[in-house]
Amino acid sequence: MTGFFAVLLLTLGLGLPFYSQQKTNAPVTSTQSATPRATPTRKRTTTRRRTRNTASRPAPKPTPAKTATTEAGWSMFTSKPGRFSVLLPGIPTEQIETKQSDQGPYTTYLYILKEQGNGFVIGFVDYDPSFNFNRQLELEMNRDKFIQNQKAKLLQSREIKIDGYLAIEFTAETPEQTFRSRVYMVGRRPYQIIISSPKGLDDSANVNRFFNSFKVTAS
């Protein structure tokens, strides 16, 4: 069953438009004044001026979201089902999908956010208890399938340990985007975190803040 997680990251996350959480207010629509004809000319003129001013007044603009490059714009997001916490520059959307396989059902959880050109994905998979897998192969296949489905080129990959757990950290790129990702397992759960940035942008501050803040509890 290795590699299913990476495929779903494409089909449910990075391969689809990100959800916009900003809402705009509709412009105010003015109504024609029902001023009687007997009203003096000065008062009619004053009423029309007020109506014109109301109609031409621009609708209030939504407060712009804080950019991912400002420290104050980031806050801690916690997932109880995922048993993780991470700093993000906004609130991610959650997507859950359960599928059947020859080895039993598995459920993929994704948390997706796009903010000021950066894409953030946190995901994990719950496999059927009867499914036995090779942990090293699970990590490598999730890395390789992700790169394959993004049609990206692997730039570097290294094995590391995160809080005592075996992990793979890698960087890949397409002509437009650079992807930095970590894949590791806590218990029977494979986790993958990804940050994408426009190619050529020095985004190391955001990458380090995102990676270093991600914490998982074992139970």
Image (cartoon, rainbow, N blue to C red):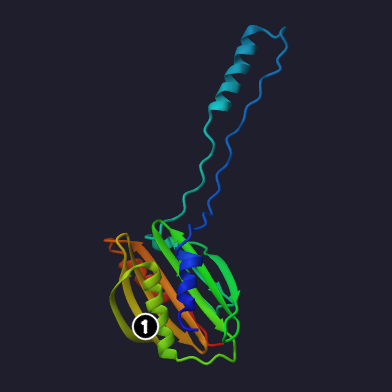
Q: What's the residue at 47%, 70% (across, down)?
A: 9
* SS under mark 1: strand
Badge 1 density bin: few <14, some 14–19, many ≥20, Cα 10 Å: many
Q: Is residue 7 above or below residue 184?
A: above
Q: Position of residue 190 (x, y in %)?
A: 48, 83
Q: Position of residue 142 (x, y in %)?
A: 42, 79
Please state the total of marks drawn on the protein image. 1
> Which of 168 and 102 lies nearest the eye of the viewer?
102
Q: Is residue 35 left or right of residue 26?
A: right
Q: Position of residue 64 (x, y in %)?
A: 47, 49
Q: Is residue 178 above or below residue 37?
A: below
Q: Residue 42: name its quadrant.
A: top right
Q: What's the residue at 41%, 82% (across, down)?
A: 141
- Residue on which disc 1 sits: 168
* Residue 163 in view of the camera: no
> Which of 122 and 68 lies nearest the eye of the viewer?
122
Q: Is residue 120 above or below residue 156?
A: above
Q: Is residue 151 left or right of residue 21?
A: left
Q: Is residue 18 left or right of residue 36?
A: left
Q: Amino acid at mark 1?
A: Ile
> Which of 93 and 104 lies nearest the eye of the viewer?
104
Q: Position of residue 59 (x, y in %)?
A: 54, 36
> Which of 56 and 8 lies nearest the eye of the viewer?
8
Q: Residue 117: name its quadrant.
A: bottom left
Q: Is residue 198 left or right of residue 24?
A: left
In the picture, the quarter occupied by the C terminus is bottom right
